Image (spheres, rainbow, N blue to C red):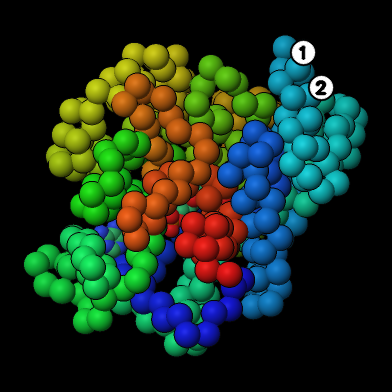
Amino acid sequence: MLDHAGISVEVFEKEPDVALHQSSHNSGVVHGGLYYEPGSLKARLCARGRDLIKTYCATHSLPYDECGKLVVALSEDELPRLENIFRKSVGNGVPDIRMLDAEEIRDIEPNCIGIKALYSPRTAIVSYGQIAKQFAIDIQHLGGEIRVSANVTKITETNDGIFLEGDGSPLHEAAFDHVISCAGLQSDRLAKISGDRPDPKIVPFSGQYYVIDRDFRDHVKGLIYPVPDPRFPFLGVHFTKRIDGEMTIGPNAFISFGRENYSGRSINLNDVGDLLLYPGFWRFAVRNVPMALRELKTVISEAAFLREAAKYVPSLSSVTVSPAVRGIRAQAMMGNGSLVDDFVIRRCGRVTHIRNAPSPGATSSMAIAEYITREILAIK
Ligand SMILES: Cc1cc2nc3c(=O)[nH]c(=O)nc-3n(C[C@H](O)[C@H](O)[C@H](O)COP(=O)(O)OP(=O)(O)OC[C@H]3O[C@@H](n4cnc5c(N)ncnc54)[C@H](O)[C@@H]3O)c2cc1C
């Protein structure tokens, strides 16, 4: 982390506490960097970020479990894609990565079937909610301020600097030299009020997780993922061990009828209206009917959800599960309906906006901070 004496930092958070959105509603995986295009921001910042998060957890005695991850091919037609991920992960410098045959898969995950797998033994799990709370404590120890229940509704840049307002009232006294907006599910709206261009727009995709019956949780030791199918923009359900020892299945991916609608039982008319009036959404929807049908099955039927997961661990085909936390992905979409894959971090005047930070955004968080200060703001 950078250590800059003389720079004061103030954080404005609209909720009564930090990390109540994506940062505490995610899979908790410290990704190795398997899938990302070598040279992309994701590849670069994930590699740096995973090392920074590991050191940060060790320094602050936060739990960090290197439980390892398997990406499992069930059929021959998945092998070229698995090989391609292997090549990318070598290019991205993922530590100790190797390919396994069916027998070797069972040495790592005795209940998992598959004809070949990519094994990343250093992939780890953490609690990003806990890490974010520790970041807040550190900021305060270093003299910074965390202002909760401070909803930023206006950003004005003047010759004197930048001023923030919340619901018609100023949120601070002295002008800021720089503002960094990392508003997750609201990031496009914050960009818009500061005068940045409308695209990309945030489209919320919810992800349901299920926790499996405790008596069965040892059927899986770490993380078991499918080989991504290029026809579908999201991964499909997988097994993720949680840092509290529970084993989860999920997340699926389906349009959320509200950017912060975690219960899934209500509809936010403003958010839905925003979505329906966005031509990019309709272009995306028309192109992704097969994905919507696959995911819809897992949204309406717990049994279908389990069936997907049990393809990898058949001994769990009739396990009892209970719904766990839902996450909502802040996924950036362009007007032509394409989902933005890489991180988008852009400066508009003296305001820097994080406009797309999907997974591995949490893994990369400390590296994103370093990138913004060193490369975008050029603070050496
Ligand atoms: C289901 C799911 C699974 C994921 N799994 C992983 C994973 O395993 N590993 C990984 O590395 N990444 C994962 N991610 C991605 C990761 O969670 C995100 O990249 C990361 O949490 C983004 O952090 P953030 O601070 O940008 O956004 P958030 O954590 O969403 O924080 C944005 C904050 O901005 C605040 N805010 C919004 N608008 C305003 C306003 N107007 N004024 C003041 N405050 C405002 C919000 O209240 C919120 O606290 C996952 C994401 C999801 C949704």
Question: Closest to the observer: 27 or 287?
Answer: 287
Q: Residue at x 26, y 76 (%)?
A: 175
Q: Are marks 2 and 1 in contact (CB under 8 Å)?
A: yes
Three-letter amino acid code at disc 1?
Answer: Glu
Q: Dividing the image into 4 quarters, which one contains the N terminus?
A: bottom right
Kindly state the secondary structure of the residue where label 2 is placed.
Answer: loop
Kindly state the secondary structure of the residue where label 1 is placed.
Answer: helix
Looking at mark 2, is its residue's CB closer than 8 Å to ligand 1?
no
Q: Residue at x 52, y 63 (%)?
A: 378
Per the rendering, the mark at residue 228 is none
Per the rendering, the mark at residue 76 is 1
Label 1 neighbour load within 10 Å: few <14, some 14-19, many 20+: few
Q: Is residue 202 above or below residue 324?
A: above
- Residue 131 percent location from the top left of the image: 55, 68
Q: Quadrant of residue 349?
A: bottom left
Label 2 neighbour load within 10 Å: few <14, some 14-19, many 20+: some
Q: Is residue 147 above or below residue 215?
A: below
Question: Closest to the observer: 280 or 237?
Answer: 280
The quadrant where ligand 1 appears is bottom left
Q: Dividing the image into 4 quarters, which one contains the C terminus?
A: bottom right
Q: Is residue 168 visible?
A: yes
Q: Residue at x 57, y 26 (%)?
A: 308
Q: Is residue 107 above or below residue 229?
A: below
Question: Closest to the observer: 334 or 122?
Answer: 334
Decide which of tag 2 and tag 1 comes sooner along the chain. 1
Which residue is labeled 2 in the image?
115
Q: Is residue 4 left or right of residue 172?
A: right
- Residue 332 percent location from the top left of the image: 39, 37
